[in-house]
Image: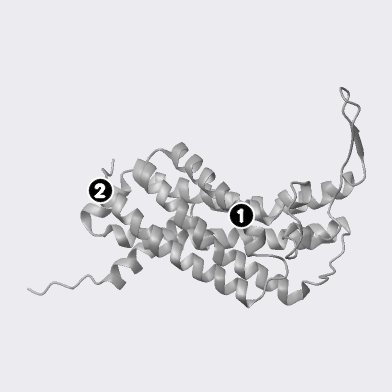
Amino acid sequence: MNFEHNSFGKRLGSMLKVDFRRMFTMPLLYIMVGSCLVMPILILVMTTMMDGSVSVNPQTGVETVVEGFDNTWQAIGSVSGTAMSMDLTSMCNINMLYFFVAVLVGLFVSQDFRSGYAKNLFTVRAKKGDYIIAKTLVGFVGGALMLIAYFIGTILGGAISGLSFDTGTAGVSGIVMCMIAKIFLILVFVAIDLLVSVAAKQKTWLSIVGSLCAGMLLFTMIPMITPLDSTMMNVMLCLAGGILFSVGLGAISNIVLKKTSLV
């Protein structure tokens, strides 16, 4: 009797097929992608309507002037060398979506453990390393879809609100490189989120809260790593960082799965 060798490629391919089917049949994915599409439209339209309006603090009498976006591409990011600030335009941009990735990965992984799917998977056929690789790739694709949806929503929002599409010093190539760099940077956050999620297992709230807290430590670095006037150097740095984090934290996630209980 001959037994078919279950190679790494076959195991990973089978797991990816199952995971992608699960992800693309989850209402959660379409809700999140749809939210990412609508969000920039609402942000750009509402801030344009409120631009220049003044609010007065009744206790101190201090006046606050609402400043909206001057350019559509501000919803994507700012050019390098721009001073960091905590105003509306610097906070309400595409970088918020890295926290959405934490929610997607946390819910996806915790569902595996709550339903017993993970325990059955490891018992029957899969290795824990294959599981980590598959979840990393699935999380990366899900995050990339959200970023692309936000980019499309930004263009629609800019057109509806009548904002300028002038690329300025960034240029079209800079914006394209910026988006590619941001997509590769997803790998860094997916690796972090996956490590927290496999440690939390079925505790969805813990995986999401832990991932959000870990992501906040890197949030301020995103504008510097992926400025609006990005070059191929930014793309390569994000790709290299994504691979290093995926391999390094993926190995730690594998150890966590091996050393801890699956229930």
Left/right placement of residue 122 relative to residue 168 reads left
Q: Which residue is drawn at 37% across and 40% down?
A: 202
Q: Which residue is drawn at 53% across and 48% down?
A: 28
Q: Is residue 167 above or below residue 219?
A: below
**Amino acid residing under circle 1:** Val
- Alpha-carbon distance for marks 2 and 1? 35 Å
Q: Residues within 10 Å of mark 2 (few under 14, many from 20)?
A: few
Identify which residue, 152 or 89, lies in the foreground.
89
Q: Residues within 10 Å of mark 1 (few under 14, many from 20)?
A: many
* Residue hosting label 2: 259
Q: In this view, does 69 lie above or below 52?
A: below
Q: In which quarter of the image is residue 168?
A: bottom right
Identify which residue, 159 or 175, lies in the foreground.
175
Residue at the extreme left: 1
Task: Indicate the position of residue 243 as horizontal and vertical percent values.
Answer: 46, 68
In primary-sequence order, the first of circles 2 and 1 is: 1
Left/right placement of residue 65 relative to residue 237 reads right
Q: Which residue is drawn at 40% across and 44% down?
A: 110
Q: Callout 2: helix, strand or loop?
A: helix
Identify which residue, 145 or 197, lies in the foreground.
197
Left/right placement of residue 261 relative to residue 108 reads left
Task: Indicate the position of residue 200 as horizontal and vertical percent values.
Answer: 38, 42
* Residue hosting label 1: 33
Q: Residue at x 28, y 40 (%)?
A: 263
**On-image quarter of the N terminus:** bottom left
Task: Indicate the position of residue 23 as horizontal and vertical percent values.
Answer: 47, 56
Asked if the residue under mark 1 is in contact with the one under mark 2, i.e. CB atoms within 8 Å, the reply is no
**Amino acid residing under circle 2:** Lys
Q: Callout 1: helix, strand or loop?
A: helix
Q: Is residue 144 above or below residue 216?
A: below
Which marked residue is nearer to the observer: mark 2 or mark 1?
A: 2
